[in-house]
């Protein structure tokens, strides 16, 4: 937590010297709640929440990427007000103030979440669809059973995928 606090402070100092104004320091929360999100910035509460699992997984990367990403959201809000979350203002802060790539996705492993797969059925059997495929179906894609050629339909049961990967 100490390193995290220091890195947040470091980011704010960079922003302060760049914008020549001072910023209020946020409340920091290191959360071990299971989530796919590496960090989040709450603008109205002025709070940064960081994912403890991902921090432990790759602490250096986390400090170098995720912390500036979230601090940039607060700085962006303080300087520019209501703008797009990952718009040009935010990107400018990432690149010019923090000297970081302005990426919006992370590459931490989410296997620890043991994401559920979703059960589908056809005429001949049940199928375990990955969350990615299930999301595709939600967006209008359809999958066929290779054996009976019937379109897969969603079962209501959601299983935990504990296959030990
Ligand atoms: Zn973001
Ligand atoms: Zn089938």
Image (spheres, grey):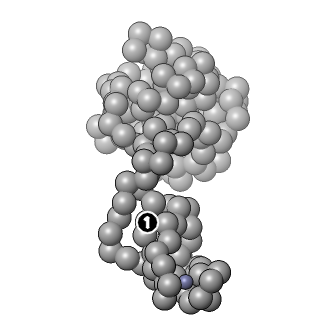
Q: Please name the residue shown 43% across and 70% down the image.
A: 119
Q: Quadrant of ligand 2?
A: bottom right
- In the drawing, does residue 74 fall left or right of residue 34? right
Could you tell me residue 36's position as x and y percent? 46, 45
Query: Foreground residue, 33 or 159?
Result: 159
Count the numbered circles shown: 1
Q: Provide the residue designation for mark 1.
A: 118
- Position of residue 44 relative to residue 28, above or below, is below
Residue 24 visible, this angle? no
Quadrant position of residue 74 = top left
Could you tell me residue 148's position as x and y percent? 59, 88
Check the image and name the residue furthest to the left. Answer: 45
Query: Foreground residue, 153 or 6?
Result: 153
Quadrant position of residue 68 = top right
- Position of residue 76 relative to residue 62, above or below, is below
- In the drawing, does residue 165 fall left or right of residue 24? right
Quadrant position of residue 47 = top left
Q: Please name the residue shown 61% across and 24% down the image.
A: 61
Quadrant for the C terminus, please.
Answer: top right
Quadrant for the N terminus, please.
Answer: top left
- Position of residue 83 relative to residue 47, above or below, is below
Local packing at callout 1 (Cα closer than 10 Å; few below 14, some 14-19, many 20+) is many
- In the drawing, does residue 65 fall left or right of residue 95? left
Could you tell me residue 49's position as x and y percent? 38, 33
Q: Please name the residue shown 62% across and 83% down the image.
A: 147
Q: Please name the residue shown 48% across and 79% down the image.
A: 125
Residue 31 visible, this angle? yes
Could you tell me residue 134's position as x and y percent? 50, 69
Q: Secondary structure at mark 1?
A: strand
């Amino acid at each position: 937590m100490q390193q995290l606090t220091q890195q947040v402070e470091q980011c704010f100092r960079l922003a302060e010297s760049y914008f020549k104004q001072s910023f209020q320091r946020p409340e920091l929360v290191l959360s071990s709640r299971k989530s796919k999100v590496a960090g989040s910035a709450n603008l109205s509460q002025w709070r940064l929440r960081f994912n403890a699992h991902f921090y432990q997984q790759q602490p250096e990367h986390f400090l170098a990427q995720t912390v500036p990403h979230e601090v940039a959201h607060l700085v962006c809000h303080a300087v520019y007000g209501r703008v797009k979350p990952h718009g040009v203002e935010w990107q400018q802060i990432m690149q010019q103030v923090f000297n970081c790539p302005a990426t919006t996705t992370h590459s931490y492993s989410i296997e620890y979440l043991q994401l559920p797969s979703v059960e589908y059925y056809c005429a001949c059997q049940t199928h375990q669809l990955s969350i990615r495929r299930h999301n595709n179906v939600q967006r209008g894609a359809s999958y066929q059973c290779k054996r009976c050629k019937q379109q897969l339909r969603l079962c209501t049961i959601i299983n935990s995928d504990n296959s030990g990967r």
